[in-house]
Amino acid sequence: MRQSPANRILILIKTDGPQLAAAIGDALGISGEAARQQLSKMAEEGLVEPVTVAAAGRGRPRQLWHLTAGGNRQFPDGHAELTANLLGTLVEQLGAAALDTVISAREAETLQRYRQELGEAHDLASRIEGLAGIRTREGYMADHWQEADGSFMLVENHCPICAAATVCAGFCRSELETFRAVLGADIERSEHILAGARRCAYRIMPR
């Protein structure tokens, strides 16, 4: 199915970060002016907003287009409000230990499933590629690459369980431990959506 220009712009900003109108035009194969017109329409709908940033040196300030909260809500949210309410009720009625039990059970199930899906990946690069594919199918809009120093990066441009993770950071901690176990590597989270970053990023180092 062909995507509308608005949807293509939303995905571009979501995956690549704030963009100049001219860069959006290049990506869509349209003029910068046509891109600005589309962006203005999307701004009226509350999906994007321009942010002026100072240019390096004596250059003119630049206007970068960001997603608003409304724009981010166009992507899967994993039934955010219902999830948050259910977790809150669980802790209120059964205590924090019950939530820990749920997180541990989810971690065990996820780890088993990931290991099965990555069973044919016999080196770290292949496991990371496979994991990125799994996470993308689950709604995380994942990407990966290898750095010049030999380490790898795994980034997730969207978090479909963000509401759950906001209520309980244990979900984020559990996911990090799952990655370490399934990849058999040392991993540190260098960017975190819950800390205000636009994405979650993980640096992966062979053991």
Image (tube, grey):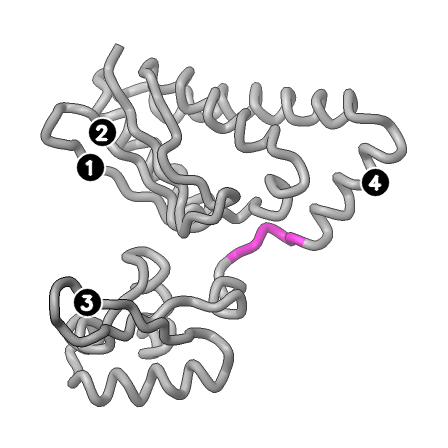
Which residue is more in the foreground, 191 or 105?
Answer: 191
Crowd tier of the residue under label 4, counting other residues whose Cα lies within 10 Å: few below 14, some 14–19, many 20 or above: few
Q: CA distance from mark 1 to mark 3?
A: 29 Å
**Looking at the image, residue 56 lies above or below residue 187:** below
Crowd tier of the residue under label 1, counting other residues whose Cα lies within 10 Å: few below 14, some 14–19, many 20 or above: few
Q: Earlier in the sequence, mark 3 or mark 4?
A: 3
Using the image, tell me which numbered label, if any, was put on residue 152. Answer: 2
Q: Amino acid at mark 3?
A: Ala
Disc 4, SS:
helix
Q: Earlier in the sequence, mark 1 or mark 2?
A: 1
Q: Residue tagged by mark 4?
A: 89
At 28% across and 85% down in the image, what residue appears?
A: 36
Q: Residue 162: image x %, image y %?
A: 56, 46
Q: Earlier in the sequence, mark 2 or mark 3?
A: 3
Q: Residue tagged by mark 3?
A: 55
Q: Residue 113: image x %, image y %?
A: 48, 25
Residue range corresponding to the magenta coloring: 76-80
Q: Quadrant of residue 114?
A: top left
Magenta span has 77? yes
Magenta part, dominant SS: loop
Q: Residue tagged by mark 1?
A: 145
Q: Residue 18: image x %, image y %?
A: 31, 63
Which residue is more in the foreground, 41 or 53?
Answer: 53
Q: How many numbered discs, if any?
A: 4
- Depth-wise, is mark 3 or mark 4 nearer the camera? 3
Q: Badges 4 and 2: C-beta atoms under 8 Å apart?
A: no
- Depth-wise, is mark 2 or mark 3 nearer the camera? 3
Q: Residue 202: image x %, image y %?
A: 34, 32
Disc 1, SS:
strand
Q: Badges 1 and 2: C-beta atoms under 8 Å apart?
A: yes
Disc 3, SS:
loop
Magenta span has 65? no
